[in-house]
Image: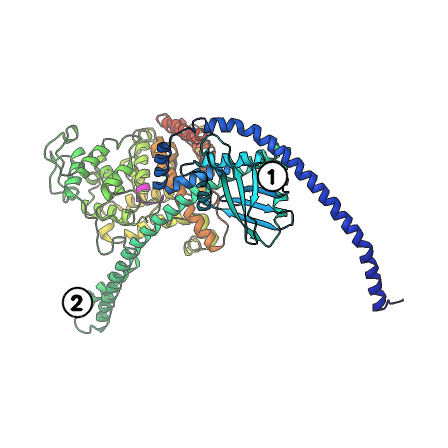
Amino acid sequence: MNIPSESDVWMREEKKKKKIVPINLFSSFIIFIIIFIFIAYIHTHTRTHNIHTNKATEKETFGNSKATGDDWGKQNKRSQQHGNGIAAGMLTELHGCSSLFVTTTDRCSIMAKMNEEAECFCVSVVMPSGVCYQDEFDEEGLCNVKETLGEHVSWARFFSVVREAFNNGQVTVQKATDASVEVMCHADASGEGAGVCGAEFNVSKVDVSVLPTIEKGLVDLYQFQAHPNTQEQKLKKLTEEVAQLKIKTDQLEKEACFLKEIAHRRRKLDIYNIQRIKQLREEVTNYEGIYECAHRATKGEATTNMSHRSSTQARHKGRIRQPLGEKECAAYDPELLCLIKSRWMTLSGIDAGPSCNRVIVPSPSPGVSNQTPVFGNKQQEVVWEAMNKLDAWDYNVFEVQQTMSGDDFASLHHQPNGGSLFITMYALLIKYSFLSKFNIDEQIALNWISCVEAGYNGNPYHNSMHAADVLHITHYILSKGGMIERCQLSDLQVFAALFAAAIHDYNHPGVNNNFHIKTQTYSAIVYNDRSVLENAHVSSVFELMKNPRFNILESFSEDQQKEIRETVIEMVLATDMSLHGKHIAHFNDRLEEHASFTERENQNLALVMALKMADISNCGRPLEIYLKWSSKLSDEFYLQGDRERNLGVQCSPFMDRMEPALAKGQILFINYIIIPFFEKMAVFLPKMRLAVECAESCKAYWLKSGQG
């Protein structure tokens, strides 16, 4: 193989260069001729196009331009008072001004157009010698140029003068120096600004060539005029993108507001929790002292036994979650409870001594429900009016919650005076006369209701207000819906059903079973991934009731307690939506068999279906109530999605706030779960047909809004 020497390589390269040079010069000459012809064509075409398109605009825009100096002075004064208005007027006219190009008689090439940011007017000049000038004029710079036409010249007139000068070849280059050049756009001798020379731009010299900028501007203009459809499609696409970005911006702004609200609420909750931690630490110290005393006691069997019992009670109490802390009951309004109690009960024929009346004594006058009582405050009046709808499908727990706690969200984590669940459960215990029928101690009942309500966390959706809503709907299905009559339910079964409804989401953490299973939480491990939350709800309440002060079942017999417990467990565990298909199939089989539903097994199945329907009934409620619940459910879903994203796991369906799909999710849920289920319930209980009709209306809302 022959390897060439360095000199051979050098000689070959020199020969190549000599051959290439003439070709490069010739090519450059040809390219220059083509560009010159192309620019001339574009300039002629642009002038013709601008003249035709601008005449109509000029006539429309400036037909009334013969305003007096005083009129323009007033307008100018108003503009000075509103700086944003000036900018808006300048930008409007700037955006309406097409790219302008002209070749002067002394062979200077000039282009004027708005810059890439669409905020400034850019003027580029190429002299015959190749020297280049370029400047961008912002609002302030253009104001100075506009003043050369006159003090009160409008932006519309200013840009009209510039356009006409370019279109008519009335642009000249003057006073060219090493620093700058003056570009004069001569005005006509009539109309606004008459008697002045024109608009004068002082353009600075630049070291780089602006010829590529001019060429690009001409090519863009040619593309726009030669392919208008393509440009319209691009504009349409950009418009759609802007619309989508606006929607996303609105969503993010709403999210930001919601997160600010959450953060504010969390700060308040943190303060409350810090205080509770301090109290609990003091209690722990106290209990440790009791425990130490119990072990140090050496004298007296009675003293030893007493200390042992105290320490045992202390340790047992410490294992049970105490939602109210050291308190046992909410700071209720006795007058309000008296109004509720007197609505369905009086002292007539009842001894004031029984435990069912030892806290709240009803009015001695009969017929309180048939007359309007004297209210001590607005809260009593609102709650009294709400009780008028306790047997109605549109009973509104939002109104009750707001009047009891001031709002329907921020206060849910701490309701010292009781909320909607407290009021609704107490009213139903009175309405069904359960306190007297089962000889329930009223104070223990109030303690239990208070503690159960306080045991619900302040989640957007799964909170004590949701429990109150489900409790009311369960009552409606049993009474007005006809289930008590259809299934011949006993008072004990009705009590168990209301008990189950009140506690069915107790201590809900705001995330679903799927989250627990995916992240393998302590609860998921304890309950072996089987109905994790539902098991926790039931077990937590029965654990709470080990404290005699909260044991609402204390007066029931052992057999009654067993039956209530079995019914409650079966009902609450059935609210696990992963088992929905199984329960629906079982219920459908019984319907097809024309079962009587008066036997214990079928009665329990009916109660299961009642609680299941109540649990998801918001999709079959009046639209106003439904929309509030759907918004709260969406908020809670997105919060779970946020937690999943932070943990690095995939967001559950419909829980990613970055891809909102509330309408789609609601339509699917109503179509495939709600309506088929409610249809079967309407077959079983014809009076529940109204739920199907409401569900259809709720679905129609999303379809009509175009969001589905």
The spot of residue 694 in percent (x, y) is: 38, 28
What SS does tag 1 mark? strand
Q: Residue at x 36, y 41 (%)?
A: 80
Residue bearing the label numbered 1: 102
Q: Is residue 248 left or right of residue 685?
A: right
Q: Amino acid at mark 2?
A: Ala
- Structural crowding at the residue carrying mark 1, measured as other residues with C-alpha within 10 Å and reported as few (<14), some (14–19) or many (≥20): many
Residue range in magenta is 460-466
Q: Depth-wise, is mark 2 or mark 1 nearer the camera?
A: 1
The spot of residue 274 in percent (x, y) is: 28, 59
The spot of residue 269 in percent (x, y) is: 30, 54
Q: Quadrant of residue 599?
A: top left
Q: Is residue 260 left or right of residue 373?
A: right
The spot of residue 9 in percent (x, y) is: 83, 64
Of the numbered discs in the image, which one, if any, rests on residue 658? none
Residue 135 visible in this rendered orientation of the protein: yes
- Disc 2 from disc 1: Cα separation: 114 Å
Look at the picture and state if 177 lies above or below 333: below
Q: Residue at x 17, y 42 (%)?
A: 356
Of the numbered discs in the image, which one, if any, rests on residue 302? 2
Look at the picture and state if 293 lies above or below 64: below
Work out whether residue 494 or residue 111 is closer to the camera in this orientation and state it: 111
Residue 655 visible in this rendered orientation of the protein: no
Locate the N terminus by quadrant.
bottom right
